Structure formats: C-alpha cells, structure tokens
Amino acid sequence: MEFKRILPPAYLRPYIRYYWTLESRDLPAGSFRTIADGSPGLIFQQPDKGTLFQFDKQLPDIFLFGQATKHATLHMRGDFSATGIFFQPNALKAVFGLNAGELTDTCIDLRPAAKKAGFYLQEQLSQAVEADRFKILSDYLLTLLRKQQGREDVQMQYALTRLVESRGMISAKVLRDEVNLTARSFERRFKQYVGMPTGLFARICRFQSSLGQLRSNNFEKLSDIAFEHEYADQSHFIRAFREFAGCSPKEYYQQAIAFTENLAAI
C-alpha cells in the first residue's frame, strides 16, 4: 500500500489541506475505516483498477463527500488506485456553493456538476498521468471559486477558525457573542457552512486533537490526553474516541495503519 500527500497551490490552501494518492497493488482486497475528521473530501478512483463500496453500494468513480459525524467502513474490491482531496471544513460552501448540511454523512456523483462547469473530470483524470491530475483538479476548483467571489460568509469563517484553533474548547455562546448573532441564526448558518451543529463540530475538533496527540506518542498514559482535552475522565475520552474512530484509543494505537487523517486500514 503506497500513500502520497501533495500540497495544493498557494491560492487553494484556504480551501484544501492536501491532495493525496493511494495505490494498493500489493493488496488486492481489503477494508478501510473512515474517521470523523471535521472535513469533506473528493475521491477519484480508477474504474479499471477496482472500486470502493460502502454498505455493499458501489461508490461513483468520482464523488464529493460531506462531513462525517461518525466512523464508517469502506470495502475495496480489486487492485485500487485513487486520487483524492482532503478539504478544509469550509470547502463545500466556499468552493462549491453547497449547503454543507445536505451532504453530511453522504456523497454525490460529481460528474454532472463538473460537466456544467465545463469539465469532464472522469475522462480527463482517467487519461492523465498523476502529476497532471492535480492540475486538472486545481483548474476545476479555481473555476468554481471565481463563481463564488463576493459570497464569503465572514462571520462563519471567523467562528470556524476560532473553533479549530481552540481545538473545540470554546463555547458556542462565546462565538455567538463575538459575531453578534442570535443562537438560532448562528446555528442555522454554521450548519449550512460546515455541515453540522456547532457542538458536534467542536466535539470532533477535540477528538481530532486528541488523536493527533495519540499518533505523535506525546503522552505517558491515556488519562494525560483526556485531561489535556478537558474530558471529564478517561472513560468519557474512550467513549468519545470510539464514537468517532470506531475503536478504542488503545486499539487504534496498537493496530491501526493510518494513511490519512480520516482513513485507516483495518
């Protein structure tokens, strides 16, 4: 299994964390666990080299997926070759102009929308070498961004940035006061912008921060991670971790082979 991470051009970094590729020529079949990560994404899979299934449903050759609120399992059949994008949390609204809440825990075939923008992504990506695929995707996203100019939601971007920087440990009330919005207006707009309620996104931010500490081996015992992330106790931390990762912190640390922030072989 070979995983590569590629940084996007500077003009796309407010919207993309990175591009990635995954090849499984040495692993003809297997399963992956997706992890709640606070971000949407895009996957293009070469149809002649296997495909991904979720709940026995074959996923499109190129699809856009929204926020995940829990862990899930994907099954791979055949050799696998994919190119993907790990977006920033704001991308569905800021780049695609979508109501992010409508894509939470689901995905859509991207071909019809891309065709409207003048891109035949499946055909173009299938015929391109790896390096050219990133340029094709970058050109497509830049075209969409230009259509969204002047539609930025500055208040929600501010709230999102504050939540991420605080590792989910800032209250929704503080955020509402800082952007001067009522609770109802704030929650409605935040869900459209990010894809889930503020409280749930904050919990995922806190989980992701704890996951980062676990991966870096920067702890002596699990209770240290729980304490630093303001969980009530170690049991509360383990329950939250299992909800978003599908396994306990100990199981993840000992067994999981992580390829990206939201994808691990199982």
Image: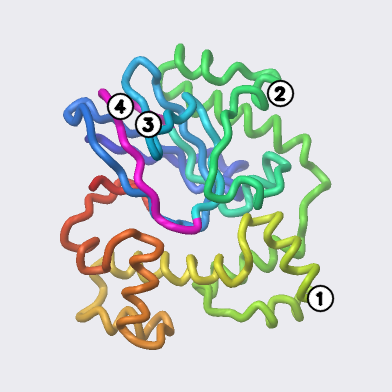
Asked if the magenta segment contains residue 73, the reply would be yes
Measure how far apart labels 4 and 1 are at the Cα level.
Answer: 48 Å
Q: Mark 4 or mark 2, which has the lower sequence index?
A: 4
Callout 4 crowding tier (Cα within 10 Å): few <14, some 14–19, many ≥20: many
Measure how far apart labels 4 and 2 are at the Cα level.
Answer: 28 Å
Query: Can you give x and y, in whole percent of width and height, for residue 237 in the image?
Result: 35, 77
Asked if the magenta segment contains residue 174, the reply would be no
Left or right of 83 on screen, residue 15: right
Q: Quadrant of residue 227?
A: bottom left
Q: Mark 2 or mark 1, which has the lower sequence index?
A: 2
Residues shaded magenta: 69-83
Residue 31 badge: none
Q: Nearer the viewer, mark 1 or mark 3?
A: 3
Residue 80 badge: 4
Callout 1 crowding tier (Cα within 10 Å): few <14, some 14–19, many ≥20: few
Q: Residue at x 28, y 68 (%)?
A: 214
Q: Quadrant of residue 28?
A: top left
Query: Can you give x and y, in whole percent of width and height, for residue 94 in the image?
Result: 69, 47
Instruction: Answer above or below: position of 89 versus 29.
Output: below
Q: Secondary structure at mark 2?
A: loop
Q: Which residue is mark 1?
A: 182
Callout 3 crowding tier (Cα within 10 Å): few <14, some 14–19, many ≥20: many
